[in-house]
Amino acid sequence: MLKNTRADLWTAVSSGLMLIGALCNPTLATAAASKDFSIVNTENGSVEGTIEKDHRRFLGIPFAAPPVGDLRFVAPQPVKSWHGVRKATHFGHSCPQGTMYTDEDCLYLNVFTPYPLSNKPLPVMVWIYGGAYVMGSAATYPPVKIATEGNVIAVAMNYRVGAFGFLAHPALAAESDASGNYGLLDQQAAITWVKRNARAFGGDPNNITIFGESAGGASVCAQLTSPAMAGQFQKAIIESGPCYMVKPRDVAEAYGQNIASENGCPTTADAAAADCLRKLPVSAFAVPGTEIIGNTGGGSLADPNAFPYTPTTGTSVLPLDPPTALATGQFNHVPVIVGSNHDEMRLFTAVAFDLLKGAPITADQYPSLIQTTYTSNAAAVLSQYPLTSYATPDLAFSALSTDSVFSCPTLSGRQSLAQNGNVTYAYEFADENTSLPVLKRADLAGFPEGLGATHGSEVPFLFPIAYLNPAQKRLSHQMIGYWTHFAKTGNPNFSGAPAWPQFDTSQNNLLSLVTDATHVTTDFASDHQCAFWAGLPPQK
């Protein structure tokens, strides 16, 4: 294995229904009495959102105190309550990342609800964004389609990324075991806030599903294995989230000490070092997003050290690395959907080579790239993925990287879940016609077939962030149906959609999500050559 292996009549009728429903729901009764459904009373004060014809949205609600000044590199602290009604009509600041966002006051979440209101509490879905743990914002993912089509309460939260969320350092560890896991603790604070305030928005606090993509999916995996999250959510969905995206404490602290040293701060475990880190300008910790993609254009993604910041294991937040926790049954047993995309790594290869380097991988470069990435296993990998089997070196490298970095680790993760008696549903997003405009570039010469079902290409089918043609809209409706029925019952199946059986380790069965052709397949392991990757010895 590898190293550390999205009409007046109706108004009158619906208003009547809401008033009837309010008789059974104290929260709705308060709103019905005031006839102002745009105001909700949270535990910290009232918030006023916006009502559209089919939904309500409440934006920029603080779920923790601003992590600024002395609260930088500290676990999220309680929100200070406010008097009067707080406007909740604009997104909160995105957390610091690169040079684009620099405001550390960023711990806000957004709540979307169907409208008119239901007469009974609805399931709640909480979204965790991706971005390699150094990028991302809840504002990018308005979960309006999930809330309206799926009839659920949908929440998207911010959490600290980069150094602010995941810097580990001996001085910070001396203060608190939270060192290296502030971002995960932000997620936990948001989830528990949702649980405490769900009823105010019409939600069921005992039916919460967390879901995320990429680093957000990896975060879901981490929360599955965090002891503090026991009982805090009832279901989980992992989209293209490598569970191995973590670092052991010693490795994380060594990286943090390097960052400290580069900025003139001590590497020692004393108060002076912690104080120095808290006084550094935000710019001192900037990590450009292109640096991540450029440095991890291939199989090196399988090495957690390829990422500057990840959650830290060997702590009370994450006692074990998630793959080990899943394999040994030491996780929060809740129904899980877990899946990946058929051509995950095409995006990273295209950006790292065709765009950032201005040219695709050449036939001459291919062997040396494999050697650099897979070292002692390079010869075996070259033999298994010969250039003669692919139209271009870009496609060859993307295929082997997809298999080793995403597909086979995802298979291993769902096998661990199922083998430990966990209700598990598996999928692969395999629709080749991406709806993301940024992925439809003419200068991606290494991809004559296109980027296919690459990393993140399923997200627009869940969130309104790109144009969908009629066929894609049908798949979107299908996916939102699966996701939200799973949130309601723990079973994704619903009338009119292809049947989705539970994952069976003896069959390795999963649902292949394709426009107008969704179907069950058992070819995943062979398609991605997982037996080969499982049989490789550790790299030297």
Image (cartoon, rainbow, N blue to C red):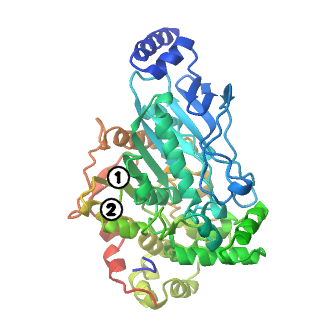
- Pick whichever, 22 or 249, lies toward us: 249
x and y, in percent, of residue 294 in the image:
64, 71
Q: Is residue 57 visible?
A: yes
Residue that mark 2 sits on: 414
Q: Is residue 437 left or right of residue 105?
A: left
The residue pinned by badge 1 equals: 336
Residue 172: which quarter of the image?
bottom right
Query: Eyeballing the image, is 177 above or below 437?
Result: below
Local crowd size for mark 1, using a 10 Å CA cut-off: few (<14), some (14–19), many (≥20): many
Q: Amino acid at mark 1?
A: Val
Give the residue type at disc 2.
Arg
Q: Residue at x 34, y 78 (%)?
A: 534
- Does residue 442 lie above or below 150 as drawn? below
Label 1 vs 2, first from the N-terminus: 1
Tell me the element at label 1: strand
Q: Residue at x 45, y 69 (%)?
A: 244
> Badges 1 and 2: C-beta atoms under 8 Å apart?
yes
SS at badge 2:
helix
* Residue 271 on image: x %, y %: 70, 69
Crowd rating for badge 2 (residues with CA inside 10 Å; few <14, some 14–19, many 20+): many
List the single residue furthest toward the left. Answer: 506
Q: CA distance from mark 1 to mark 2?
A: 9 Å
